[in-house]
Structures are given as C-alpha cells and as structure tokens.
Amino acid sequence: MRQSGLRSLRFGAALCMAVLGSSAAFAQDAAQVDVSQLGSFIRWTGVATSLIVIAGAWVLLRLLAGFVSQFGTQFAARRLTMQKIATIAQFLIFIATAAIVLALSFRIDKTVLTLIGGTAAVAIGFAMKDLVASFIAGIIIIMDRPFQVGDRVSFDGFYGDITAIGLRSVRLQTLDDNTITIPNSKFLSDITSSGNYGALDMQVVIDFYIGADQDIDRAREIVNESALSSRYVFLAKPVVVLVTQQIVQNLVTVRLRLKAYVLDTQHEKAFETDITLRCLRAMRENGITPPQMLLPT
C-alpha cells in the first residue's frame, strides 16, 4: 500500500516536471519507470471500441442533421422547433460519447483520479481554457437564450441566420451565403440583436424619401397598400407607415418609414424587393418624385 502510494507520487511528479519543461534528466529517468504504469491504466481493447463509438456518434450526428434539414424543408412551420431539439440532442450525444469513451479506455480508480487531478488537470487546463470557456458559454446560451437556432441576428457587423450552436462555437449563415463561425465566449460580452427571437415572422423596416412639395398623403397610402398587398406580409401583426421630415444633403425631404412583418425570415429580402418595386411604380404613375436638388439659375 505504501509502495503503491510512492509509485503514484513519483509518476505524478514526473508528469508535472515534463509539462513544465524543467529538469530533463529527471523526467527521462522517471519516464522509464512511469510509462509502463501509465500503460497499465489504459484499456487497449477499450481504445479500439472507443474509436467505433466515436465513429458511431459521428454517423448519428450526420443522420440527425440530414433528418432536420429534410424535415425543415417539408414542414416549414416546424423547422425552428426541430432545429432547437437537434441542438439539445447534439449536446447530449457529445457528452454521452465522451463519458463512454472515458469509461472504455481507462481503468478508473483512486490512483488514476489522483494523477488526473494533480498533473493532467494543470496541463489540460491551460491548453483547453478557451475551449472550456466556450463550452460553458454554449451552455449559458442554451439556458439564457439570447438567441436560438433559426433566429436572424446581427452580431459584430454580421447579419444572418443562426444555423448551429455547438460545443465551441456558433455558426451564422449570412444573407450572402457565407458561414461565419463565432466562439461562444464572444456572446457573453458583446451585444447581439435578434430580429425574430424564436418566431418565424420578423419586422422589416423600409424607408422611402420624397420631396417636401409632393403629395404626402397619397405617398403614404401607396406605401401602406404596397405592404398590405404583398404575398410575403404577415397580416396578423400591424403595418405602420411613419412620416417625418428630414434634411438629407442640404435637401428638405419627407421620409416614409414602413414597418411591416414578413411571414418568414427567409423571405426578408424578397419582401423588401416586392414592396420597393410596388411603391416605385405607383409613385411614378402618380407623379410623386424623390427630393430634387435645385439647379442655380
């Protein structure tokens, strides 16, 4: 019992000295004795089984992602719900796989726990501090929910849809079809704006500018009717047109700000285009023009 404790202390000391990079001669002498002890804690047959478990988890994650994608395409109203369930399922698969691999690959006893706590924890802690911080931040994001999978958010100059919340990072698909990977820890200190926050519909703001001498009432009617008649509008929520007077580049203008809801965030830009085209055509037909700079006589 006493000799076993001495061997454990020597093994822990050898690993600590190797990690810190001091006394190479000591580490070399200790390694000759302790490497064999380290090998005795590993279940080599379990390592092979662990590789199979990891491969199975990877296949399961791929199948889950494919199923959610197909389901979301066929049932758009349930897309966000399935994406949320898939995110939680991914976390559970990661945690379960790690626990199974650890149980299969190592013989867990008091000696191993002592060695892990005294040596590996220090080295791994410094090497994986960013990963651990991002992992904890990912759990906080899931619990606090500043945004969810499927939300259309604005973060650090990027704007798009949250497609995945992983152990280390969040993936954001921009409207230019670029995938942005953001570490989870970034969201703990920076401001994130969510346009729909778990809903399919989202408010869209569109500005129109006309001259101060134009028919403002008719222009407001055109903007309102263009929004109400769009096939992308979500009529369960109000359509509002705000009118303000502004000075833009030394010109007195009237701004018509439309606030309407699109029925699905995926149609945001199509909604903006549809309304803009309708308004421009109707304003041209009614002789309503944008602000004009007066030429000197």
Image (cartoon, rainbow, N blue to C red):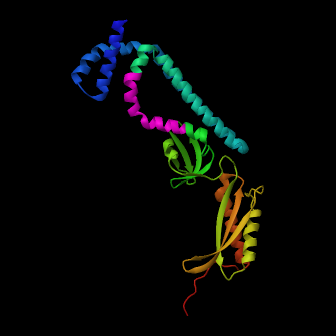
Q: Is residue 230 above or below residue 139?
A: below
Image point 64% across, 68% down: which residue? 207
Residue lying furthest left in this view?
25
Q: For the magenta stretch, what is the residue range?
A: 117-138
Image coords of residue 118 (percent x, y): 38, 22
Image coords of residue 73 (percent x, y): 68, 43
Image coords of residue 92 (percent x, y): 59, 29
Q: Is residue 125 magenta?
A: yes
Residue 63 can be seen in this image: no
The mark total stands at 0
Residue lying furthest bottom in this view?
297
**Between residues 57 and 106, which one lies in front from this camera angle?**
106
Quadrant placement of the N terminus = top left
Image coords of residue 22 (percent x, y): 25, 27
Residue 32 can be seen in this image: yes
Image point 33% across, 15% down: which residue? 9
Q: Is residue 3 magenta?
A: no
Quarter of the figure with residue 297: bottom right
Q: Is residue 165 above or below residue 59?
A: below
**Between residues 111 and 56, which one lies in front from this camera angle?**
111
Quarter of the figure with residue 251: bottom right
Is residue 47 rendered to the left or right of residue 220? left
